[in-house]
């Protein structure tokens, strides 16, 4: 693929991709560029080794040659003539409508083509053909009119901003960012448009440069107007100074206002310091849990020491062994009481050693044999 270079016609203008042909160009070289509006002098800002082919968009312009001293001198003469014609063009535009402001007037190197850019308020509607007719009667060249906005006008005319430096849009910024009043609010700036507007009358483009850093700081701190819970009580966030990174808190119960550093408040955020909404939400959840626990409460179970697990067969045998002597002793006591009630008075209770406790003697018979035996002994 043929090499491609990037060229700008003005300091912060659009980047035009061009084919250098056989020229070996470096950054800073001035070249003569062929456009559909004549030959223009541009400056090389991007070399072929810095361009990726997938980044190239739009048609490729053709570089005819390197700009010579004569070309640069001609360009200076053309610019001086365009500056003089701008005043006359403004007079012609005022005749059509006093609210038209001529922002820029440029010629090509051969003064064949003339481009005029003008500004009109958004609510003003003037027919484009009417303006073109007023200019064409004074400029026989190939005329092209372009209606632009206030920012584009500041970019073309240049100037210095409220910071004392050259305008960003005319010195280095190639595109205009999207800006809203919300960006100023996020950075704690005054919402007064006169204090945050540039020379173009629009909001400052630099409001977008540091908004990410402000958002990073604000993301770790409570928002202004919110109420937070602290160990000293509830406090309302009055303001946040992002430059000094300090926070002002108002304690309603004590009626005092204190100032903390962002690091001190950030270190306690989420632990001892937290939003009231979160605290109320947590307390409400805990309260509901306590109510549900109270409704379902039946009692408190006390722990009981249980004996170690034993075999069922051995436990049954042990219980039977322990219970058997108890049953025998009961029977013994019952039988002894019965015997005591049946034994006549004066008789002794048999013991285990006496023969009567085991066997009962058979009573001796008294009869003829006993008397017979006694007779001889008497003789």
Image (tube, grey):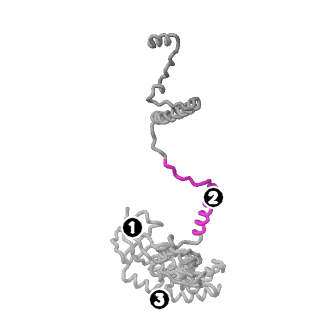
Residue depicted at x 34% and y 74%: 26
Q: Main secondary structure of the magenta part?
A: helix
Residue 107 lies in the magenta-colored region: no
Instruction: Tell me the crowding category of disc 3: few under 14, some 14 to 19, or many 20 or more residues within 10 angstroms, Cα based.
Output: few
Q: Which mark is residue 294?
A: 2
Structural distance between the alpha carbons of marks 1 and 3: 34 Å
Magenta highlight range: 278-305
Place residue 296 in its image quadrant: bottom right
Instruction: Tell me the crowding category of disc 2: few under 14, some 14 to 19, or many 20 or more residues within 10 angstroms, Cα based.
Output: few
Tell me if label 2 and label 3 are in contact, CB under 8 Å.
Answer: no
Q: Quadrant of the N terminus?
A: bottom left
Foreground residue among 311 and 290? 311
Residue 290 lies in the magenta-colored region: yes
Most extreme residue toward the left is 24
Residue 364, visible in the rendered structure:
yes
Residue 145, visible in the rendered structure:
no
Q: Tell me the residue that label 1 is attached to.
A: 51
Q: Tell me the residue that label 3 is attached to.
A: 164
Place residue 9 in its image quadrant: bottom left
Per the image, label 2 sits on a secondary structure element best described as helix
Q: Quadrant of the C terminus?
A: top left
Foreground residue among 248 and 214? 248
Foreground residue among 189 and 17? 189
Structural distance between the alpha carbons of marks 2 and 3: 71 Å
The mark nearer the N terminus, 1 or 2, is 1
Nearer the observer, disc 1 or disc 2? 2
Nearer the observer, disc 1 or disc 3? 3
The mark nearer the N terminus, 1 or 3, is 1
The mark nearer the N terminus, 2 or 3, is 3
């Amino acid at each position: 693929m043929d090499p491609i270079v990037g060229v700008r016609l003005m300091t912060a203008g659009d980047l035009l991709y061009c084919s250098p042909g056989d020229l070996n160009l470096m950054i800073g070289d001035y070249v003569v560029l062929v456009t559909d509006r004549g030959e223009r002098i541009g400056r090389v800002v991007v070399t072929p080794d810095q361009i990726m082919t997938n980044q190239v968009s739009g048609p490729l312009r053709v570089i005819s040659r390197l700009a010579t001293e004569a070309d640069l001198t001609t360009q200076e003469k053309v610019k001086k003539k365009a500056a003089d014609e701008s005043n006359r063009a403004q007079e012609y535009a005022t005749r059509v409508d006093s609210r038209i402001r001529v922002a820029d007037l440029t010629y090509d190197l051969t003064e064949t083509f003339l481009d005029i850019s003008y500004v009109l308020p958004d609510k003003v509607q003037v027919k484009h053909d009417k303006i073109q007719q007023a200019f064409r009667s004074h400029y026989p060249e190939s005329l092209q009119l372009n209606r632009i906005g206030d920012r584009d006008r500041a970019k073309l005319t240049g100037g210095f901003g409220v910071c004392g430096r050259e305008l960003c849009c005319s010195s280095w910024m190639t595109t205009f960012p999207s800006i809203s009043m919300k960006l100023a609010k996020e950075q704690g700036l005054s919402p007064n448009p006169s204090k945050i507007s540039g020379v173009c009358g629009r909001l400052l483009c630099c409001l977008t440069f540091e908004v990410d850093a402000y958002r990073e700081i604000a993301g770790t701190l409570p928002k202004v107007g919110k109420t937070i819970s602290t160990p000293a009580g509830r406090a309302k966030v009055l303001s946040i100074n992002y430059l000094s990174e300090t926070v002002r808190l108002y304690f309603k119960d004590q009626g005092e206002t204190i100032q903390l550093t962002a690091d001190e408040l950030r270190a306690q955020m989420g632990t001892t310091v937290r939003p009231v909404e979160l605290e109320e939400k947590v307390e409400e959840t805990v309260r509901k849990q306590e109510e549900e626990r109270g409704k379902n409460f039946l009692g408190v179970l006390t722990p009981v020491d249980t004996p170690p697990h034993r075999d069922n067969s051995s436990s049954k045998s042990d219980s039977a062994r322990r219970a058997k002597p108890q049953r025998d002793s009961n029977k013994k006591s019952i039988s002894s009481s019965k015997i005591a009630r049946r034994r006549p008075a004066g008789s002794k209770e048999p013991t285990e050693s006496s023969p009567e406790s085991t066997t009962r003697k058979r009573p001796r018979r008294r009869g003829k044999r006993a008397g017979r035996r006694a007779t001889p002994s008497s003789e």
